[in-house]
């Protein structure tokens, strides 16, 4: 209950503070990508339920290349700000496992399935550790295999640790780490 109230209060507060800059960034993004400026994708949420995640578009939809503007959005994490609406919809939380595409969290077995009891989050210890995941994967000969055998199992381990130690204090520590990592 406290976590939910915290999420709603701060999502509204951040949208009030970031609303005008977000609108300007969305307009620039729409022009840059020659699209509606938003990216929608199915992700796996709490209890394995699929939901649509909201992000700002960072790739040109026609040729699937990341623009300079898109790189800025990704590096600065502005592309993630629309997920505040996912928090208001009750689909996400500020802290929790980052939501993944179908075929990962929804396929967990045994104790690891406890992770699905958590709402996905904007940030987590795993997302802090793998903040540069895209570059890490680009350095691998087989990025998908490296993700599936190294990164994803480590994220599962870290998210399961969060499951057992979660509290508002742990969430606040994770948020502070995220802010100072940026």
Image: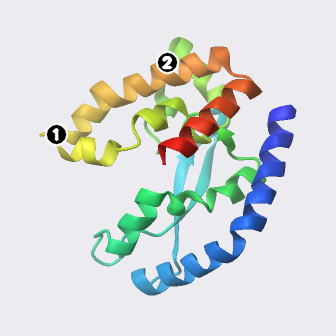
Q: Residue 63, image x and y in percent?
A: 27, 75
- State the residue at coordinates (47%, 29%): 107
Horizontal arrangement in the rendering, residue 21 relative to residue 13 (left or right): left
**111 shown above or below 64:** above
**76 shown above or below 19:** above
- State the residue at coordinates (67%, 25%): 170
Q: Residue 62, image x and y in percent?
A: 32, 78
- State the residue at coordinates (53%, 81%): 36
Task: Work out which residue is located at the far front of the displayed protein and give it.
Answer: 180
Task: Work out which residue is located at the far left of the displayed protein and give it.
Answer: 141
Horizontal arrangement in the rendering, residue 90 relative to residue 158 (left or right): right
Determine whether label 1 and label 2 are within 8 Å by CB: no
Residue wearing tag 1: 140
Horizontal arrangement in the rendering, residue 54 relative to residue 171 (left or right): left
Residue 64 occupies quadrant: bottom left
**58 shown above or below 2:** below
* Nearer to us: label 1 or label 2: 1
Quadrant that contains the N terminus: top right
Residue 141 occupies quadrant: top left
Residue wearing tag 2: 109
For mark 1, give the secondary structure.
loop
For mark 2, give the secondary structure.
loop
Horizontal arrangement in the rendering, residue 67 relative to residue 30 (left or right): left
């Amino acid at each position: 209950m406290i976590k939910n109230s915290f999420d709603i209060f701060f999502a509204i507060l951040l949208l009030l503070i970031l609303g005008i800059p977000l609108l300007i960034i969305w307009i620039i993004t729409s022009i840059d990508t020659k699209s509606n400026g938003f990216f929608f994708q199915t992700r796996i949420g709490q209890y394995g339920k699929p939901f649509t995640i909201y992000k700002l578009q960072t790739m040109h939809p026609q040729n699937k290349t990341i623009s300079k503007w898109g790189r800025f959005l990704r590096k600065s994490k502005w592309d993630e700000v629309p997920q505040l609406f996912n928090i208001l919809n009750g689909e996400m939380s500020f802290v929790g496992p980052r939501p993944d595409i179908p075929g990962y969290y929804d396929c967990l077995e045994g104790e690891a399935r406890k992770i699905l009891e958590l709402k996905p989050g904007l940030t987590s210890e795993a997302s802090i550790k793998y903040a540069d995941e895209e570059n890490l994967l680009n350095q691998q000969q087989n990025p998908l295999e490296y993700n599936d055998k190294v990164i994803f199992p480590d994220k599962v381990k870290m998210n399961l640790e969060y499951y057992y130690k979660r509290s508002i204090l742990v969430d606040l520590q994770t948020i502070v780490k995220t802010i100072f990592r940026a």
